[in-house]
């Protein structure tokens, strides 16, 4: 009665910018706001990289050239990502494709 049910996740939740995995998308969004979309001047947490760029430009008159704490090649502020939404299809395919090959085996 007091135990939590373990749900079998069909797709894991992970951060596009740093590849860190999370239990659910709500925690992922909190992570992105704190680590990748936080204003470097006033520390305001924004929902997307684009929102952060606009905030910093309008409020502080500065530019943000890349997403903070992102892996090389994933620091572009042009891609609108919120949680798992907006991740480029090729990145999703590469991420899940690697895992899918390990899971499916048959003995025939």
Image (tube, helix red, strand yellow):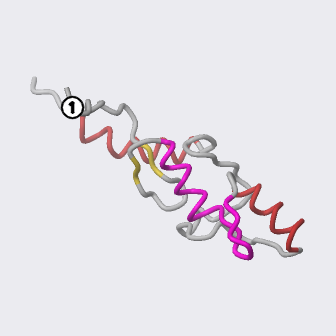
Which quadrant of the figure has residue 54? bottom right
Q: Is residue 29 magenta?
A: yes
Instruction: Give the residue furthest to the top.
Output: 108
Q: Which residues are magenta?
A: 25-45
Which residue is at the front of the view, 5 or 87?
A: 5
The image shows residue 46 at horizontal and vertical percentages of: 70, 57
Q: Quadrant of the C terminus?
A: top left
Front residue (pair 52, 44)? 44
- What residue is disc 1 on? 2
Hey, which residue is sitting farthest left in the picture?
107
Residue that lies at the very extreme toward the front in this rendered image:
2
Magenta span includes 43: yes
Point out the image quarter for the N terminus. Answer: top left
Q: Is residue 74 shown left or right of residue 13?
A: right
Q: Is disc 1 surrounded by few (<14), some (14 to 19) or many (20+) residues within 10 Å?
A: few
Residue 93 versus residue 67 in the image, above or below: above
Give the quadrant of residue 59. bottom right
Residue 21: where, in percent of width, then height? 40, 52
At which x and y percent is residue 47?
A: 68, 51
Residue at point 32%, 38% (across, down): 100
Query: Does residue 71 appear to the left or right of 57 in the view shown?
Result: left
Instruction: Name the residue rendered at 53%, 53% in the picture.
Output: 16
Q: Secondary structure at mark 1?
A: loop
Q: What residue do we see at 43% from left, 47% from top?
A: 95
In the figure, 92 relative to 21: above or below? above
């Amino acid at each position: 009665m007091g135990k939590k049910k373990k749900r079998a996740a069909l797709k894991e939740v992970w951060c596009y910018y740093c590849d860190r995995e999370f239990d659910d998308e709500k925690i992922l969004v909190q992570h992105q706001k704190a680590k990748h979309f936080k204003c470097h001047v006033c520390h305001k947490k924004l929902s997307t990289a684009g929102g952060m760029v606009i905030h910093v430009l309008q409020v502080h008159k500065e530019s943000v050239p890349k997403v903070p704490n992102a892996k090389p090649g994933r620091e572009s502020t042009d891609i609108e990502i919120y949680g798992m939404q907006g991740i480029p299809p090729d990145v999703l395919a590469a991420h899940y494709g690697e895992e899918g090959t390990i899971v499916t085996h048959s003995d025939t």
